[in-house]
Amino acid sequence: MHPGCQEIERKFLVRGDYKAAAESSSRIRQGYICSSGGNTVRVRIRDDKAYLTIKGPSLGISRFEWEREIPVADGMALMALCRGGSIDKTRWLVPFGGHTFEVDEFYGDNEGLTVAEVELSSEDEVFEKPDWLGEEVSADPRYRNSHLLTRPYKSWPDKV
């Protein structure tokens, strides 16, 4: 993702083993300085790097995204401004069919939830789906990280 461009991605539940095919993984902690009207300002610490990201509202499976790497010390300081705590997860990068699926395994209040995202070059791009990919949840706002912070998976009465 280049800073300041349109992000097009689809999101799915995960229903099988993806870890054997993963090429790497990293631990992510992220929080939200602001999340309102579909706009979000996020701080992310990913292993030994930090990022500040601004996202616009979703238009279908597309949304504007601006992201910059920042010094880790700045990222840690900005995490203190985040409201409602943080999301804790491991992200697995799993190549399949010419794409890399980002599979997020959540911890804490979102333990038991695993979702996969695939970034596309257009909304109608056809892509190959691995066997471990489950139901598509791209249009379901409950699966957005900013939503998982305020309404964690453990509180859902209808967990999948």
Image (tube, rainbow, N blue to C red):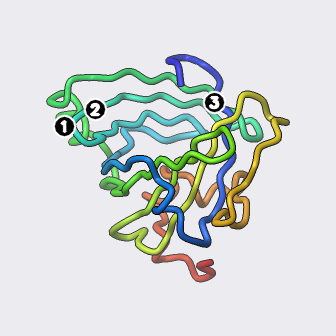
Q: Position of residue 138 (x, y in %)?
A: 70, 52
Give the CA separation, mark 2 to mark 3. 20 Å
- Please give left or right for residue 78 compared with residue 51 in the image: left
Query: Quick check: 146 above or below 160?
Result: above
Query: Quick check: 107 above or below 4?
Result: below
**Marker disc for residue 7:** 3
Compare residues 109 and 35 and report the one nearer the observer.
109
**Image point (73%, 54%), residue name:** 129
Which label's residue is closer to the chain start, 1 or 3? 3
Q: Which residue is identified by label 2?
A: 50
- Residue 32, located in which quarter of the rendered image? top left
Q: Are marks 2 and 3 in contact (CB under 8 Å)?
A: no
Mark 1 or 3: in front is: 3
Q: Which residue is identified by label 1?
A: 76
Give the secondary structure at mark 3: strand
At label 1, which amino acid type do we have? Met
Q: Are marks 2 and 1 in contact (CB under 8 Å)?
A: yes
Q: Are marks 1 and 3 in contact (CB under 8 Å)?
A: no
Give the secondary structure at mark 1: helix
Label 1: few (<14), some (14–19) or many (≥20) C-alpha neighbours in 10 Å: some
Q: Position of residue 143 (x, y in %)?
A: 58, 58
Compare residues 94 and 113 and report the one nearer the observer.
94
**Marker disc for residue 131:** none
- Please give left or right for residue 57 compared with residue 113 in the image: right
Give the CA separation, mark 2 to mark 1. 8 Å
List the single residue furthest toward the left.
73
**Image point (74%, 35%), residue name:** 59
At label 2, which amino acid type do we have? Ala
Q: Position of residue 92 (x, y in %)?
A: 44, 52
Q: Quadrant of the C terminus?
A: bottom right
